[in-house]
Image (cartoon, rainbow, N blue to C red):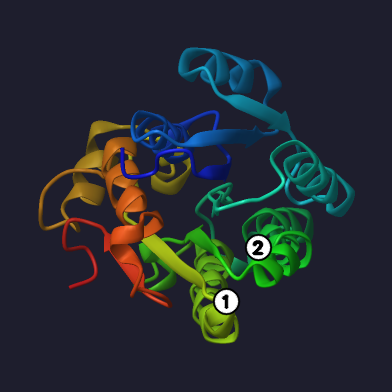
Amino acid sequence: MRLKDKIIVITGAASGFGKGIAKKFSYEGARLILVDINLNLLKKVSKSLSQDYFMADVSNSKQFESLAKYVYSKYKILDVIVNNAGITHKPKPMENVTEKEFEKVFNVNAKSVYFCGKYFVPKMKKFKKGVILNVASTAGLSPRPKLNWYNASKGWMITATKTMAVELAPYKVRVNALAPVAGKTPLLKSFMGGNTLKKKQAFLSTIPIGRFSTPQDMGNAACFLCSDEADMITGSILEVDGGRCI
């Protein structure tokens, strides 16, 4: 019960890594507010874990603000927020990515972290406690070709994590990030540019440990960084990648 009674928001919690993190956190005793734009999936996950939920588009300022108001009006405090929501564009040369695709990637992957700073950080600073965990990617450390603007958005998140950590350390707020390799999530097909055996084998050949990351891997890593066991860790980017970035 390493997260017993901690109030935790997880974005993008209805599937993939977010769902895996939610399962682990629930098992460890946390009180969760699961956030996603997909209401049907969100309700299913919420019911299966007996946890609270709030539907929101985290790239929308008003909806993110409404999330913060809901959390503080109902729970009075927030111990942890996991900025997990993320999307990608399909693999293609950088010049072929449309402006609409570019904006969507940065709105979800980057602007949502900005909104976290805008709407949750002030109270964390006031109470002098809190943990922020950003879900970045190995793409921000060791970019793959033809995912240029997705790579850049995750590189942005890594830099944001470090600068947030430096600024918030005097307020006892820790900020870290996870950098997973591509995993068994709904985004895998988009990363690979298809779902053929040949594409899977080519992708796996770049991961020394020989398998994709799983939601369980992410849940375990996230649990440690968000627990009191990691009280001295801030500004770190934990690679959950089977050796991909070596």
Q: Looking at this view, is 176 or 72 the one in front?
A: 72
Mark 2 neighbour class, 10 Å CA radius: few under 14, some 14 to 19, many 20 or more: many
Under mark 2, the amino acid is: Val
- At 76% from the left and 51% from the top, the residue drawn is 59
Residue 185 as seen in the image, left or right of residue 207? right
Q: Where 31 sits versus 208, above or below?
A: above
Task: Kindly indicate whether the residue at mark 2 contacts the one at mark 1 (C-beta within 8 angstroms).
Answer: yes
Q: Looking at this view, is 41 or 93 the one in front?
A: 41
- At 60% from the left and 85% from the top, the residue drawn is 167
Q: Where 232 sits versus 183, above or below?
A: below
Q: Furthest-left residue in view? A: 209
Of the image marks 1 and 2, the number of the one nearer the N terminus: 2
Query: Disc 2 on helix, strand or loop?
Result: helix
- At 76% from the left and 37% from the top, the residue drawn is 56
The residue that label 2 is drawn on is 113
Q: Where 77 sits versus 237, above or below?
A: above
The residue that label 1 is drawn on is 160
Spot occupied by residue 88 in the image (x, y as percentages of width and height): 56, 51
- At 49% from the left and 70% from the top, the residue drawn is 175
